[in-house]
Image (tube, rainbow, N blue to C red):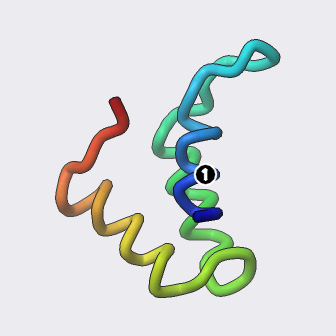
Amino acid sequence: MAVADVVEAMASYRPYRPALGIEDALEDIETNKGILYNDDIANTCLRLFREKGYQLK
């Protein structure tokens, strides 16, 4: 759940800041996998976006 929340929160506009973008979110997931995020879940998220072309709507 944390990985999905981070991706959505960072990639989306917030009233207090502009959207940071999906690439910034994925870089955070990659940098912190195994530290803040479960390796398997982080890798699945990265694969969905980078290899399978998943997009937030």
Which quadrant is the C terminus positioned in?
Answer: top left
Farthest-out residue, front = 1
Asked whether, in this view, residue 15 is left or right of residue 42, the answer is: right
Quadrant location of residue 45?
bottom left
- Residue at 63% x, 51% y is 6
Q: Nearer the viewer, residue 46 or 14?
A: 14
Q: Position of residue 3 (x, y in %)?
A: 57, 63
- Residue at 48% x, 45% y is 23
Label 1 sits on residue:
5
Quadrant location of residue 12?
top right
Q: Up-down: is 5 above or below 22? A: below
Farthest-out residue, top = 15
**Total numbered labels placed on residues in the image:** 1
- Residue at 63% x, 39% y is 9
Q: Up-down: is 6 above or below 46? A: above
Q: Position of residue 31 (x, y in %)?
A: 63, 70
- Residue at 29% x, 41% y is 55
Badge 1 local density, few (<14 within 10 Å), some, or many (20+)? few
Asked whether, in this view, residue 53 is left or right of residue 22, the answer is: left
Asked whether, in this view, residue 18 is left or right of residue 42, the answer is: right
SS state under label 1:
helix
Amino acid type at mark 1 = Asp
Asked whether, in this view, residue 46 is left or right of residue 53, the answer is: right
Which quadrant is the N terminus positioned in?
Answer: bottom right
Q: Position of residue 27 (x, y in %)?
A: 55, 57
Q: Position of residue 16 (x, y in %)?
A: 81, 17
Q: Nearer the viewer, residue 57 or 50?
A: 57
Q: Up-down: is 25 above or below 39? A: above
